Amino acid sequence: MTSLIAACALFLLIHSLISGTGLRTRLIRAVGEGGYRAGFSIVSLAAVVWMAMSYNVISETGSNILWILPNIVHALMPVMLLALLFAVIGVTTKNPTSVQQEGLLRQGDPVTGIVRVTRHPFLVGVALWAGAHLLANGDVASVIFFGTFLLVALIGMPNIDRKRAQSDPDGWAVFAARTSRTPFLAIIQGRNSFRLGEIGWWRMALAAAVYAAVLVAHGWLFGVPLLG
């Protein structure tokens, strides 16, 4: 358990104390934008691998159960479909909040497709994925593991907003006025409109295919079959 806690703490700290603070700026000045991005990516990946390995070790022996919710796995399957829709569509859509796409704030109208729904579609997907798995498992190790991803996703949204606002105050003000972190909030408030056709049918089909693959392979990959 100590190894899992340390790995999760590392992942959480680099995303909360480095990515979203002035330390990030100082590191960029010291090693350059490219050096910072490369180093951050390497450390992040190493932390995720460490987290997964530590979690798998604990899963083999078991950890204390905090709650058991009967039939919760199948009840959460629609949530997982929604999570994959947000995540897959998010990573395949141009978005000023994505890495190295800040320039879109000054190029035409970046408020299109899934960005109309939320300006952080990938992180919304991660949050839904992590929250669903946290509820479904209910043991201490899962709370730590999936809870870390949930926290990083929720913390990441305002951190990214703050960085974009600092780098391009005028462009960000226009973009933020028409978008929202919370899915559909800007649409409900009348700040933009939902246009399903802009999202792209191929993106939705890709997300559905990934979801189907996960359903079929989940038992083989993670030891928890979802079908049958």
Image (cartoon, rainbow, N blue to C red):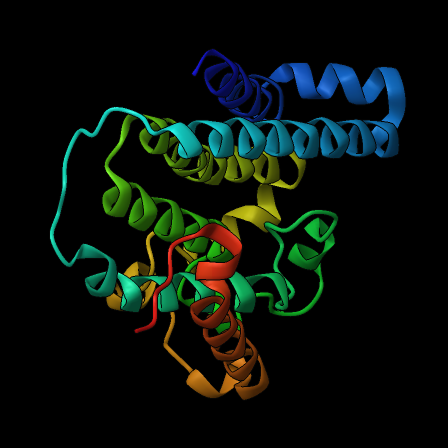
Instruction: Give residue 203's quadrant in the image.
Output: bottom right
Observer-nearest of 133 and 38: 133
Q: Position of residue 1 (x, y in %)?
A: 43, 16
Observer-nearest of 165 and 47: 47
Residue visible at 69% across and 49% down in the picture: 102
Residue visible at 42% across and 82% down in the picture: 195
Instruction: Give residue 109's quadrant in the image.
Output: bottom right
Q: Position of residue 4 (x, y in %)?
A: 49, 21
State left or right for residue 40 relative to residue 55.
right
Residue visible at 43% across and 84% down in the picture: 196
Observer-nearest of 59 and 197: 59
* Image position of 228 with respect to 76: above or below: below
Residue visible at 19% across and 63% down in the picture: 75
How many marks can you see?
0
Q: Position of residue 113 (x, y in %)?
A: 51, 74
Task: Tell me the quadrant of the picture where the C terminus can be found.
Answer: bottom left
